Amino acid sequence: MKTISKLTLAAGVAALGTTGGQAQSVGSACGCPDVSSRTTVNMSSLVDGSKNLLSNSTTLHCSNLYIMDTRVYVNDGQDLYIEPGTVIKANSNPGAAYSLIVSRGGQIWANGSESCPIILTAAADPLDGSYDVTNRGQWGGLLVLGRAYNNVRNNDANSGSVAPTGTDGVGLIEGLLLGDDRNYYGMPVGQEINDDNSGILRYVSVRYGGESIGQDNEINAFSFGSVGSGTTIDHIEAISNKDDGAEFFGGKARVKYFVSMHNDDDYCDWDEGFDGRIQFVYGLQGPDNTVGNTQGDNGFEMDSDDAPTNFADGGARSTPVIYNATIIARNLNDVGLEAKERTQGSIFNSIFARFDKGLNLTADCYTFWNAGTFNVKNCTFQECTTPLAVPGGATPADNTKFFTTDGNLSVGANALIDATYTMTQPGNVLTDRVNPVPPAGTATTTLTPPVDGFFCGAKYRGAFEPGAKPWTQNWTLAAQLGTDVSAVAGCTGDLNGDGQVNVNDYGLFINAFGNTCY
């Protein structure tokens, strides 16, 4: 599918990452001044210095450039409003990473737009696309803690990712410390609020976070602890985080349109009884993922919990439902769908490219898969060495279920999407780009998502409608860097966006000939 001249492509794409004017005009469509002319405001001037608390109602205005020079909490009963086009730059503070934490009962109203996204990034980021995507771990991240269900139990003999708080149903969020209940999520058993509303995250980009507070204790770009279904989360982006792009610790969060790219760990991770809904995920592994520097891990890492003991205490398993993901790896030892620790749930209509293993099932999850309580259906595994990995090795019956009954496909390199790219440093110089959008008329599926107020009926495989403009345009760093179809340069007539001008484009043109466009 790579038929565009490499010289033409390099010239067109390299320019995308160096547009200083674009960087300074963040939010201009909303009347925000250039970033270079905004008044600098330290976040420490907005909080109670002893407790890092905002006032009961605080608004961050896009006329200011905010410097996160302290940890900031939105406490129980408080509201934080962030105007569209606002930029927050965070300083590094190893050992006690500066982060924005929305505690239980607090609410964040970060309601950006396609033309005016809200950006949280590292202090050194010039916002022009030239800050190396390898600069992970420069600050903490965005943590939202709610009051919905999780399966954390005080006697869990877990591996240390969740320290017991002494109360069943109340966990300590990864990356923070015991002793401050503002770092806790969930509620005592029987007091959960599953439709809890922590506010709105819309068109929010979190970049270069994941700073460690201790050995193996980094912060995710987005941490969702027991977030309820009443919270609105759509069009969010996690770029170059030192841990996961997003991790869900229990709860019933609903997420739509999620970019997870160049992170050091998983694209998306869930555990502790997560029962959310996710649709439209675009993931791309870091350009530095080589044999000597393996950045990135699983597409979806799926757990019910890090320890088995909670099930004896009545804890529930993770049962999320996922539609329409496209996740691209670097063809090393990583797994597209890592199903472990007794997870259940369903993944439908998705594309996983260049993983060593497509679906990897532990013994318990293999049992759930055969019983129909864990499902992977109508997914395409492109250039995956082992599309299906089960304990003891897949049998003919396993393959029949996987490829026939469940409608999954295994295809060769670049058979459906263009999944290879080349980016060099410094400056994120892109000389060969991916095209995650399948050609028009391809990526078909027999499964239609339920149109239920959250899912929309996208009857195709992957994050992007085949042949259509991707939803990443105009607001993501992914698009600014050229790591989507927007990077196509000098390809007049390529109506379906597949990098070629051929009979498929002619068919689109002839069917539209004579129409008016007003």
Image (cartoon, rainbow, N blue to C red):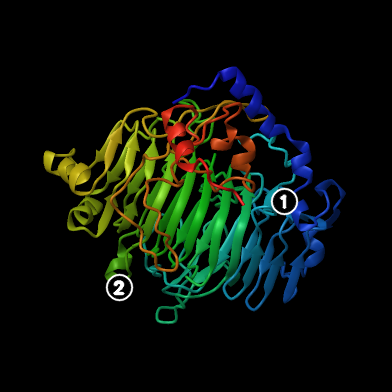
- The three-letter amino acid code for the residue at tag 2 is Gly
Which residue shows up at 39% across the image and 54% down it? Answer: 323
* Residue drawn at the location 53% of the way across and 48% of the way down: 259
Q: Quadrant for the N terminus, please.
A: top left
Q: Is residue 378 left or right of residue 417?
A: left
Q: Considering depth in this image, is 365 or 459 the residue closer to the camera?
A: 459
Secondary structure under the numbered disc 2 in the rendered image: loop
Query: How many numbered callouts?
Result: 2
Q: Amino acid at mark 1?
A: Ala
Which residue, given by chain and number where applicable, does mark 1 sit on? 90
Q: Could you say where residue 340 lies in the image, as x and y percent from the top left?
A: 31, 51
Position of residue 235 measured from the top left corner of the image (x, y, whole percent): 56, 55
Q: Is residue 17 left or right of residue 158?
A: right
Return the mark for residue 314: 2
What is the crowding at mark 2: few (fewer than 14 residues within 10 Å), some, or many (at least 20)? Answer: few
Q: Viewed as shown, does residue 453 lie left or right of 341? A: right
User: 307 or 409, which lies in front?
Assistant: 409
Question: Residue 272 versus residue 395: which sits nearer the camera?
Answer: 395
In the rendered image, is residue 160 in sight? Answer: no
Q: Secondary structure at mark 1?
A: strand
- Separation of disc 2 and disc 1 at Cα? 41 Å
Any part of residue 309 in sight: yes
Closest to the camera, between mark 2 and mark 1, is: 1
Above or below — where is 231 with respect to 304?
Answer: below
